[in-house]
Image (cartoon, rainbow, N blue to C red):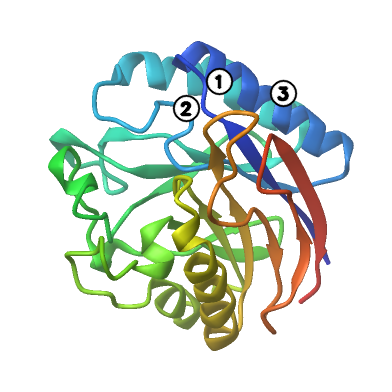
Amino acid sequence: MFIAAAAQMIQRQNMIQAARAVATMIAKAGRRGAQFLVTPEMFLTGYHGRFDQAARDRLIDEVIRPVCARHQVALVLGAGSYCSSTARRSSRPFIQSLVIDSDGTVLGAHDKVIPTGGDLKWCVGGAARDLRVFRSQGLTFGVTICNDFWATPVHTTLPDFNVPLLLARRKARVIFHAVASGSDPAYLDFHTHRLEERAIRARVWVVSANCVRDRRTPCNAPSGILDPTGTWRASAPLIGEHLVVGRITL
């Protein structure tokens, strides 16, 4: 059994505020017994390509990693990077999730491999051949970022190769899913049903964390913990900041 947490969070105005908010969530998750925590997509850097890489790296090293070690929580952190998961430099950033172990060491990263058409105006996509799984505290898991999981038809210009299923074939038992899906309610049913359907097909648990615009506007994809039968074991309200904590039994 593992205890995992998903942080539904309001985007901050700058990276310092965002890093402090992540540190607060790590501490809360640790106090509630969580071993793993996932944050929303691009939460640290903001959802754009204008962030300062050096400031990003410094905040991860000086603020976030020490808190992971202090509270013994492994973290899947939404943070863009101009360096790919395989250390390839780029003039445009990757939409990325960084995986930090419970002792504060960096295990690696996942680059969003199915960016939307809108994303591709400012980012570069990751390579499917670089997909990998991670292992921490006895758990083998994968990471997806927003459109990687559901490949929304209207907004997807790249092939949909069902990333959750590919990660399951690499022995992932859990997928930590970082999201910034927006607030258009027309997509709520699609996002929710796609999460459930692909969890069932891949036979994986999913721990999903979405970003909310403010304290009044609902997001349009759930944050929570989904089991391999497509049943939500725990979920957050669509409005406001919430930390969802629950058990994963394998």
Q: Nearer the viewer, residue 232 or 204?
A: 232
Q: Residue furthest bottom?
A: 201
Seen at 77% across and 48% down, the residue is 244
- The amino acid type, in three-letter code, at marker 3 is Thr
Mark toward the start of the polypeptide (3 vs 1): 1
Q: Quadrant of the C terminus?
A: bottom right
- Residue at 62% across / 27% down in the picture? 22
The amino acid marked with disc number 2 is Leu
Check contact, mark 1 vs mark 2: CB within 8 A: yes
Q: Is residue 220 visible?
A: yes
Residue at the spot of label 1: 19
* Label ID, residue 24: 3
- The residues tagged by marks 1 and 2 sit, at their Cα atoms, a distance apart of 6 Å
Task: Say which mark, if any, is on residue 9.
Answer: none
Q: Earlier in the sequence, mark 2 or mark 3?
A: 3
The quarter of the picture where residue 222 lies is bottom right
Q: CA distance from mark 2 to mark 3?
A: 13 Å
Quick one: SS at disc 1?
Answer: helix
The residue drawn where x is 30% and y is 20% is: 51
Q: Which residue is the site of mark 2?
A: 44
Kindly report the distance in space between the C-alpha atoms of the residues bearing marks 3 and 1: 9 Å
Residue 171 visible, this angle: no
